[in-house]
Amino acid sequence: MDPLKSSLLVVAILASSVATVHGQGFRKKGWQCEKINAPLCSNMGYNVTRIPNMLGHETQKEAEVQFKQFLPLINFNCASQLQFFLCSAYFPMCTEMVDVLITSCRPLCEYVRKQCLHVLAEFGIPWPAKLNCTKFLERNDGQRMCMTGPNFTEDASPKPPLIRSTGIKQNGTRTVTPAGATYTGSEECRKFKNSVNYYYVESTRSCAVFCNQEGIFKTSDKETMDKWMAVWSILCLVSTLSVLCTFFVDTVRFKYPERSIIWLALCYLLYSISFIVRLAAGREAISCDREYNTPKFLIQDGRRNTGCAVVFLVQYFFSMAATIWWVILALTWFLAAGMKWGYEAIGSYSNLFHVIAWSLPCIKTIFIFITGKIDGDELTGLCFVGNQDLIALAAFVLGPQFTYLIIGTLFLIAGFVGLFRIRATVQRDGNTKSETNKLERLIVRLGIFAVFSTVPATAVIACYFYEYANKEYWFYGKRDNRIAEPNLSIFMLKLFMSLFVGTISGIWIWSPKTLQSWKKVYYVLTGKRPPRPQTQRNGGHSNETTV
């Protein structure tokens, strides 16, 4: 006979004995057995339970929700008796012969705890107090009943650990990698490469990689990206901060089109700060989540984590606003250089520019937040949109960025055409050489701007297209019978180019005028007087020479 059925038969016989000894009837008013609805516990050798259970759950649904917090532990298979033990605690066996809950015996609890405690310890999780083994009966006798579990003996030798420490530390936590030849990950995630490192998230009905585990990127790749991100975010911060400080020192000096560069720098300043916040807070604090008491996994709904939500809001809003200010900069260059508009004429539309530049990103950001499309990025530990959802990546990142690039490029081309047409007119009308040279310098400056702004935007979009086209292959591990892995260099290029415009924004404001402005600040702060013209006397006549 099956050992489990034999064990349950003994329990049933003892239940009958207890009922006879105590003169109890077959049913006590106010409670009754009910069929187990939880699929994972409906085939444990018994199929009826009683609510409330020993843990105080009032409904099977409530018990099942709490039971699922142990799914990763069950998937690790640290103890063969674990699932039976948990089912007996959350869905104890019920018989109408006696008014008692029939759970596992204490030796089974102690065995399971001994086998699985080291797994929980690797993730910094203690053994749940509600499953304290002292709450379970010591043995099964004629007065009290418990289940010993299938194929269980008290002297069962411990199984070897199913996980091993990699020895690599990240944010103070040792990472662990499941070992063994058999699959132990979530059933729903079996199709993923490194499937044992994935957890099936009930709330989103999709798989997410455990934090500090390797999904599609190696741990060394993540460490390299952290260093790369630190370098360029700090450089971008310093450069944009210098632009804004110069603007506040001499606000009147900056008119449109140059005024657009100021707002562009402001966007990149805050954008770079979001990277620094992530680096300071750490990956787990920003991009990780957990269900109940499970090990942390890469977040799929950033609204559940305040740090993740804040990083997303800053990253997405100001990256989109920066792109729109780049389009406005191209437009104002076109109006000034190609259409010969004056500064005042362009400045009269400044309110409209601000409405467009801030409202469009705001609308998109709110919509993404409402729909819960914020997710974590395994490589950078940042929260953005489209990291794990390709449809969201196309709709909220690729689509808008590509549209803005096309519009801005058209304005640049139109500006070039207008400049060359005006240059031809100036030369034909016989204007002075100085006017022609001034126009040529404007063309060169616009050309430099076009290269240093359009090329980074194009590179970022190309990297996003690369990610969009290949990410499914990276997740599932094969493409044309070859192992598919992402190219780290492309992701490093994407991050570099996304910060490049902000990093070089300082060159647009550094000029002799900027130097004079900062000299004035220096004299004001130090209380010194600026140098005055020196007077030289020759033969009783004074000649003033400015030094």
Image (tube, rainbow, N blue to C red):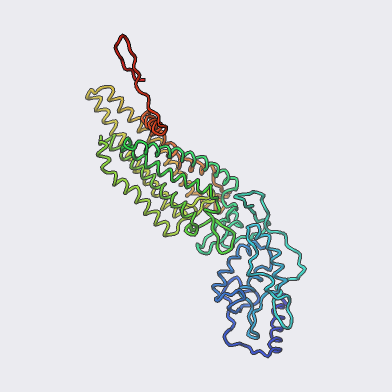
Quadrant into which the C terminus falls: top left
Residue at 54% of width from left, 55% of height from top? 288
Asked whether, in this view, residue 440 is left or right of residue 59, the answer is: left
Q: What residue occupies the far left of the structure in this picture? A: 429
In the rendered image, residue 348, in percent from the top left (x then y), is placed at 25, 42
Asked whether, in this view, residue 129 is left or right of residue 386, the answer is: right
> Can residue 413 be seen in this snapshot?
no
In the rendered image, residue 238, in percent from the top left (x then y), is placed at 46, 38
Q: What residue occupies the far right of the structure in this picture? A: 155
> Can residue 529 be seen in this snapshot?
yes
Q: Is residue 308 above or below residue 158?
A: above
Q: Quadrant of residue 128?
A: bottom right
Asked whether, in this view, residue 176 is left or right of residue 383, the answer is: right
Quadrant into which the N terminus falls: bottom right
Q: What residue occupies the far top of the structure in this picture? A: 539
Q: Is residue 339 above or below residue 213?
A: above
Q: Quadrant of residue 447?
A: top left
Residue at 29% of width from left, 44% of height from top? 350
In the rendered image, residue 19, in percent from the top left (x then y), is placed at 68, 87
Q: How many marks?
A: 0
Residue toward you, 260 or 184? 260
In the rendered image, residue 413, in percent from the top left (x then y), is placed at 33, 37
